[in-house]
Amino acid sequence: MTPVLQSYIGGRWVGRQSAQALRSAVNGQPIAHTHAEAIDFGEALHHARSVGLPNVLKLDFQQRAGILKALAKYLIEHKEKLYAVSAHTGATRSDSWIDIEGGSGTLFAYAGVGANELPGGNVVHEGPAMPLGKKGGFAGTHILVPRRGVAVHINAFNFPVWGLLEKFAPTFLAGMPCIGKPATATSYLTEAMVRLVNDSGLLPEGALQLVIGGTGDLLDRLEGSDVVTFTGSADTAAKLRVYPNLVRQSIPFNAEADSLNCAILAPDVSPDDEEFDLFVKEVAREMTVKAGQKCTAIRRAIVPASMVDAVAEKLRARLAKTVVGDPANETVRMGALASHAQQADVAERVAELSRDAELVFGARDGFAPVGQGVAEGAFFSPTLLLARKPADHGAHDVEAFGPVSTLMPYGDLDEALALAARGKGSLVGTLVTRDPATAARVIPQAAAWHGRLLILERESAVESTGHGSPLPVLKHGGPGRAGGGEELGGLRAVTHYLQRAAVQGSPSMLTAVTGEFVRGAKPHESDVHPFRKHFEELAVGDSLLTHRRTVSEADIVAFGGISGDYFYMHFDEVAAKASPFGKRIAHGYFVLSAAAGLFVSPAPGPVLANYGLDTLRFVKPVGIGDTIQARLTCKRKIDRNKVDAKGQGQGVVAWDVEVTNQNAELVASYDILTLVAKRG
């Protein structure tokens, strides 16, 4: 008896009565049923708001990052359970790796974003603060805070694990509970993943709920503090974008839609070049990985007219070697489409695309999937078309979401760019070229219609992740038909789920709100040097005003000898006098070093290491005879919950440094980053 999939709503699994049968993409056998019970979305949202949100906000950015890392490790440890289920989607082991381990990898990536780029607490200071008055008592800045709403993520069928996790990771890190709704066809794999997440016990209750089946009245119940994201067809994205309640409540909506992505072979590449083979390999790979069921797949291969037949021949030969069938067979390199409905849809779209195109390779070329029971599977032959007159071909408007691509010849680069733009907005495009000048010409123009662009040649190919691989650190999304939205992109994705607000007030008030020292606020001075305080003892605003030091010619000469920097402004009296400064000046890095000599406490102690400078600016020159003084102030503290090899805890402290001259004028400004030991 096939199992009934369950939704996870309100802290419990819901669903016992079977409804729609979900069939294996490999052999057509039923593997699960959706549940017939209706979901109470009022309960789901109430649980998210009253339980999930408080639980998530009890944690800060750093703690949530730690949970993401632990969850990623847990899923990796139990990945084989997901691989076993993933086989029913028609995915090969390498296809499933993209989905399953790619999902865990995204959790790891956002754990790193949180640990390295976000503060403790739940307020991000998006500085710097700006003075708004002449006397220094009124300033303004920006903060980012959790929206205190719920994120609803509606996902596509092609990546049941990664699709949810790549949205969940930045959502959770930003402090929002979420409700995930996977596409029904492959929801059995998403359900298996969410069960593992629940078994881990790592997430606070209410942080993640799962919907199997339709969304009912969920969207009608959302509020202005909520967020909706969607991955899927451009047509569905267009309908959701104007959903009445989303429009009425001004609810942020982000769409990542299937698009007619392209790859362009530049005219500087010849059939004898390595780049020619790279182009062929990339197009073939994008046709066969996940059986072409990727929103980033190459649907249009745009090549010089003089080489279109050579490209067609090489692609045909490469596709002919692709073994299609049951992924359990070790010889298989391409599996099935995710469902029989998808199989029928792709066949219909290919028929439409074939009206004005030649068939270069397809089912007629000996298509015979291997394996037991595959006759009832959702297999589809890799299909390569050639549109000799590409300007008006349907491939600019019709997408067959499977192992299908269309070759298009062009006369010159202007025509190639025009063909690329006919996609009306794409997630990704690839340019294969040997010539940097060609890249410099094509990429800026193509960027207007693409969310991401890959320049592929022999040097980058050694490490390239390929045309179709969205990376956590880079934006995923595209203009126009591609949905006009953005996902991923490192910290950018987290900020999509945070609310930005401008804050105005005195520097002291801004310091209190942001948790970060704002210049102009009254510092805290004491008899204890700030470098003698452990991490727990330090407070934002703890400060030291140093003694003074007068810069001499001997200082400049000595520093030049040590550093080897004999720039004329430091040593040539005549040339320096003719310069805009009108005199010899000290090295900027001498000023930096001299300031350190003024504020450093040399004895061993809580400050363990200085590992960097931020925002360094030399504001005014320091000449011979000028007297400098430094103010060191604890700017912000980040407890990353880390310990050293001996088990001693440490935190990160950023120190604001102001170096002034005898006229109280700022001459240098920067932040120092240090590791500071905890007391116990």
Image: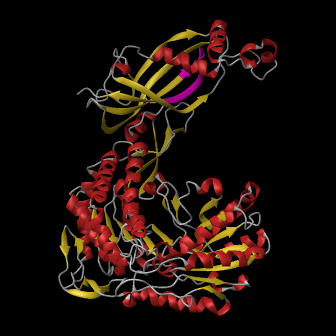
The answer, for residue 422, to whether it is visible in the render is: no
Give the residue drawn at x 53%, y 81%.
382
Residue at image location 38% in from the left, 29% down from the top: 675
Q: Count the labels in the image.
A: 0
Q: Main secondary structure of the magenta part?
A: strand
Quarter holding the C terminus is top left
Q: Considering depth in this image, is 311 or 422 the residue closer to the camera? A: 311
Q: Is residue 273 visible?
A: yes
Q: The N terminus is located in which quarter?
A: bottom left
Q: Position of residue 628 (x, y in %)?
A: 57, 15
The percent coordinates of residue 623 (x first, y second) are: 67, 14
Q: Residue at x 29, y 51 (%)?
A: 70
Report the span colored magenta. 659-671
Q: Is residue 669 magenta?
A: yes
Residue in the foreground of this view, choosing between 118 and 378? 378
Seen at 36% across and 62% down, the residue is: 168
The relative height of residue 195 versus residue 144 in the rendered view (above or below) is below
